[in-house]
Amino acid sequence: TPVFDISVRNMQKSKATPAGSFHMNPAALLSCLWLAAYGADVVTGRGALELYPPRIAWFNATLDHFHFDDDRGFLQKYLVYDKFWQGPAGPILFYLGNEGQVEDFYNNTGIMFEIAPKLKALIVFVEHRYYGATLPF
């Protein structure tokens, strides 16, 4: 079940807005934005790591993309959640990691898990090199 719902039933038609547009209660809007940003289930306090446990994997990444004679590489960590995915024809939601361990961003990026079921998408989070467990040297 989604942790929040931005839908028409949470909005109301406003006579002051152009045809076809909606007005959302400011408190509801702030709640939705907070949940989208932080991803936690505020009722239970559970994050995406608990609600959508990922598969942890590694791939060989190129260390130096500017010198083709340099074949050094390193293992780069990524997390995959495929329970919504409908196979190779389905979309992939890809999150390129920030400066920190990838689990923190996975756990706190709720919007990915909100839209993936609707899109039948694969979710992939890649850890930024030199952060977390992805250390080339």
Image (cartoon, rainbow, N blue to C red):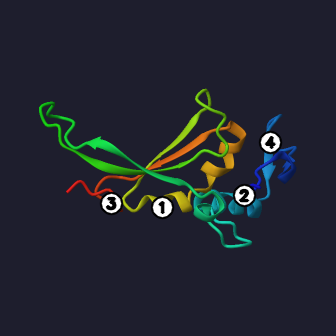
Q: Quadrant of residue 69?
A: top left
Q: Marks 2 and 4: in contact by CB < 8 Å?
A: no
Report crowding for label 3: few under 14, some 14 to 19, many 20 or more residues within 10 A (C-alpha).
some
| Residue occupied by mark 3 | 131
Please state the horizontal and vertical placement of residue 63, each as a whole percent of the image.
22, 44
Q: Is mark 2 on a helix, strand or loop?
A: helix
Write down the residue under mark 1: 103
Left or right, residue 48 beside residue 29: left
Choose mark 4 or mark 3, whichever is in front: 3
Indicate which label's residue lies in the foreground, 1 or 2.
Answer: 1
Find disc 4 in the rendering and name its residue: 17
Q: Is mark 4 on a helix, strand or loop?
A: loop
The residues bearing labels 3 and 1 have C-alpha atoms spaced at a distance of: 11 Å
Q: Which of marks 4 and 2 is in front?
A: 2
Residue 21, percent from left and from top: 79, 39
Q: What element carries label 1?
A: helix
Residue at the disc numbered 2: 29
Which of the labelled discs sits on residue 114, or is there none? Answer: none
Q: From the viewer's perspective, is the residue at label 1 or at label 4 nearer?
A: 1
Instruction: Tell me the CA gap for discs 4 and 3.
Output: 46 Å
The Cα atoms of the two marked residues, 3 and 2, are separated by: 33 Å
Task: Give the class, few, some or many, for how many residues have Cα within 10 Å of label 2's Cα (few <14, many ≥20).
Answer: some
Q: Which of marks 1 and 4 is nearer the N terminus?
A: 4
Q: Is residue 49 above or below residue 120?
A: below
Q: Position of residue 79 (x, y in %)?
A: 49, 51
Q: Quadrant of the C terminus?
A: bottom left
Nearer the N terminus, badge 3 or badge 1? 1
